[in-house]
Image (cartoon, grey):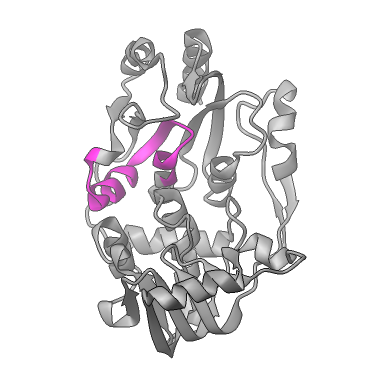
Amino acid sequence: MVVQRKLPVNFLSKDIALFKNELIKEIVEVKSRKINWALLNSHTQVLLFQSKKKSKEQSQTQFQKISINDLFQIVVKRNISVIKLDCALVTDGWSKGYFHWMLDVLPRLLKLKVEQPTTKVLLPIGFWSGYYKDCLMIIGYREEDFIFFKSKYVFSKSLYYTGHVLLTGNYNEESINKLRTIFLKSITDIDSEKGKHIYISRNKTSRRRLVNEDELFPILESFGIQIIYAEELTFEEQIRLFSKVSILIGVHGAGLTNMLFMAPNTKVLELRFENDTINNCYFSLASALNINYYYCLGSSQNSDLYIKENNFRDILNEIMSI
């Protein structure tokens, strides 16, 4: 599959290196596979015996190599459960993160419903709570659809490993838009109070904060942009709020995942690190959702971001004027 993505609305030619690898991209779907007598750890990584050469498939999925001695220690300590039913695996070591849960795990579950509709899903018990559970219920899963485990290790007699629909940061447009539709149908009054302008603050997190955020707040307020902290909202409140947003602004981070709930032809401004040619997952997501993508570059201060006031104001003027 070849994906073609349009340039950011405010693209400058000097920034081509940031986006050139994402504009036209051939993406290979990661195929699912069946594994007999699979051993998994608590991060739902499939454990493999040491081999001299790591296969391409292993590098693309959540596999971890172990030795015969490691296996012996696991068996001796007996902190292991055995599952004799056929089951499927959709999580990995990254799945607890909001972005990875929403855009890696949930598309895999939608795919599984089509490919293996009667197969139970092997799921760490921690995912049957909070917004994880909310998501699972919304997309049509119930408690009886899962096999939960609490052990440090699990042996599965027959494991159906569902690879990512596409490698992380790339999206199957049909799948991601289907997911958006399912979430929006789960709420009421979706058509009321449209046109909200939102800035998501990361200053309650430990990294990728906007270090001069206090200096930019007056600029945001002058444009009538509401400042929010996504972690203070329930999952339902986030769906409801972002379904009404026409302009979303935020530093590169999980909060921008909420553009999933925004309508096509709305606008997203990502505040991102200059010279970062790798982290284009939100640029790609905006393209898949048909959302107009803008960017503002800043300098790195340790793991945080500094944005120049004049640049920020100029880009907001451009966004508001179109």
- Estimate the x, y position of residue 125 in percent, counting from the top left: 30, 68
Q: Tell me where residue 193 sits by quadrant.
A: top left
Residue 161 within the magenta-colored segment of the rendering: no
- Nearer to us in this view, 153 or 166: 153
In the image, is 48 to the left or to the right of 24? left
In the rendered image of this protein, does residue 153 appear above or below residue 283?
Answer: below
In the image, is 150 to the left or to the right of 37? left
In the rendered image of this protein, does residue 135 appear above or below residue 22?
Answer: below
- Estimate the x, y position of residue 297 in percent, counting from the top left: 57, 22
- Estimate the x, y position of residue 130 in percent, counting from the top left: 24, 57
Q: At 47% across and 79% down in the image, what residue appears?
A: 88
The residues colored magenta run 232-257
- Nearer to us in this view, 230 or 5: 230
In the rendered image of this protein, does residue 242 appear above or below residue 170?
Answer: above
Q: At 45% across and 78% down in the image, what residue appears?
A: 75
Locate the N terminus and report the quarter of the image it occupies: bottom right
Number of labelled discs?
A: 0
Q: At 66% across and 66% down in the image, what residue appears?
A: 58
Does residue 135 show up? yes
Does residue 165 show up? no
In the image, is 36 to the left or to the right of 233? right
Q: At 30% across and 66% down in the image, what residue appears?
A: 138
- Nearer to us in this view, 82 or 223: 82
- Nearer to us in this view, 201 or 175: 201
